Image: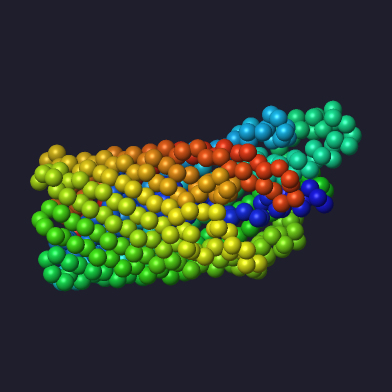
Amino acid sequence: MKKVSLFSAAMLALVFSAGSLYAGSVDALGNLSAEYVRSLSRNASTDTDAVSYNPAGVMHLENGLYGNVGCQYLLKDYSMTDNNADTTRLWNKDEYSSDTPSIIPNAYVVYKADKWSAFGSFNAVAGGGDVEYDGGSPMIGTAIGGSAYAAALTAGADAATAMATAQQTTSFIDSLKAKSQYLSGTIGGAYKINNMFSVSLAGRYVNGVKEFDISSTQAVTGLSEGTNIAKVEMNTWGLTGIIGVDVTPMEGLNIGLRYESETSLEWDTEVSGAQIALAQGLGYVDGGTEKKNLPQLASIGIAYNILPELKASASFTYYMIKWSTWEHDNGTETNEDYDNGFDAAISLEYSIMPELLVSAGYMYTQTGANEDTLTDFEMALDANVVALGARYEVMPGLLVNAGFQWAMYIDGTGNPTLPGSPDPEDITYAKDVKNFALGVQYKFM
């Protein structure tokens, strides 16, 4: 029973998240358009994707109806290295890895008139997509293998070593699968006060899904091969208020300001599998709820035309994680050890010819996570991100955006402690993400 209890604690006491894809927050995403992928700095955007980054900036568009659709394909290389696998945690593998890709869609529609506009969008505003680790993870391996190793020691050191070697070679766990995705729809409008100021107001509906699934490969404490050890499914919905201000103090200079309210999210939880009874004392109850909101954020962007054909842009987004509500069903707060996060980005756009524009950008993102918050299920790492891309006008009114981003995450070491285990883990987390995006924008009238 001790082995099963430790395993359940390792799995269910954590926040089920695959980690966000380069944004200065644990869950929130910044890559909401192909234009973003090719440049990174969009908080002063005056294109159709301004709906997400600078909603009042849509007033700079020519009058008419616009549609913009895009898709991103992300190659993800995630790994977790147990730094004690060859010393005190002999039963664990040295490294666990996942290379499951993700696909992110987006769509925008904007109708612009002389003094007002109406707009809408569809995006994935948060989450880390899908991951799949063969053999589980270091924490899960310790929860099962550590107990088995201790039991084997009663038969002698040789028996314990043989058990640890077998566990490294053939893990008790077939796979660890996790999914985290927040799809959203936004509607709103903007109004032009005068040639200098425009304002906007919008509302966003967010639907969140998190899943976590572990299956076994062989008998573990009475479980037969192929048993679904545990599956957790969490669903939620919430609303966000968004206000924006666009300022054009002089020709060639534009400033975008945006504020998004905290998105209140109560996650309804379903737990199934062999471990359902042992989850109740850990805050994850079948039929229970968990509170984990998307934090409020504030952003500013500045764009300046250095030359008629050359534009420079800078963006800063601040995520107020410390002031958001995260708590288990039993009321235990889960964000106490986090700091607030931010993104800081710069970009250049250059028009080679009237039809062709090229762009490049750089961003540093700090998520607010640290060694006290990093776990096998919350790999929110800081990152350096670079971007390249182009926009081509195929014909009047039809634009194609193509971009590439490389997110080079900074390795982080976490020291999570399993309930019932006296020693903290020592795990190095690493991620590398390459993003390819393609988008099409068309002006219908």
Q: Position of residue 308 (x, y in %)?
A: 10, 46
Left or right of residue 140: residue 187:
left
Q: What is the number of callouts on the image?
A: 0
- Residue drawn at x 68%, y 32% is 85
Residue 244 versus residue 32 in the image, above or below: below
Of all residues shown, which one is farthest toward the right? Answer: 155
* Screen quadrant of the C terminus: bottom left
- Residue drawn at x 26%, y 54% is 301
- Residue drawn at x 47%, y 51% is 368
- Residue drawn at x 58%, y 43% is 414
Q: Position of residue 263 (x, y in %)?
A: 45, 67
Left or right of residue 372: residue 135:
right
Q: Is residue 86 visible?
A: yes
Q: Is residue 392 visible?
A: no
Left or right of residue 90: residue 363:
left
Residue 445 versus residue 410 in the image, above or below: below
Left or right of residue 86: residue 260:
left
Could you say which quadrant of the image residue 148 lies in?
Answer: top right
Q: Position of residue 297 (x, y in %)?
A: 38, 61
Q: Nearer the viewer, residue 255 or 236?
A: 255
Q: Position of residue 77 (x, y in %)?
A: 49, 38
Could you say which quadrant of the image residue 289 lies in?
Answer: bottom right
Q: Nearer the viewer, residue 22 or 197?
A: 197
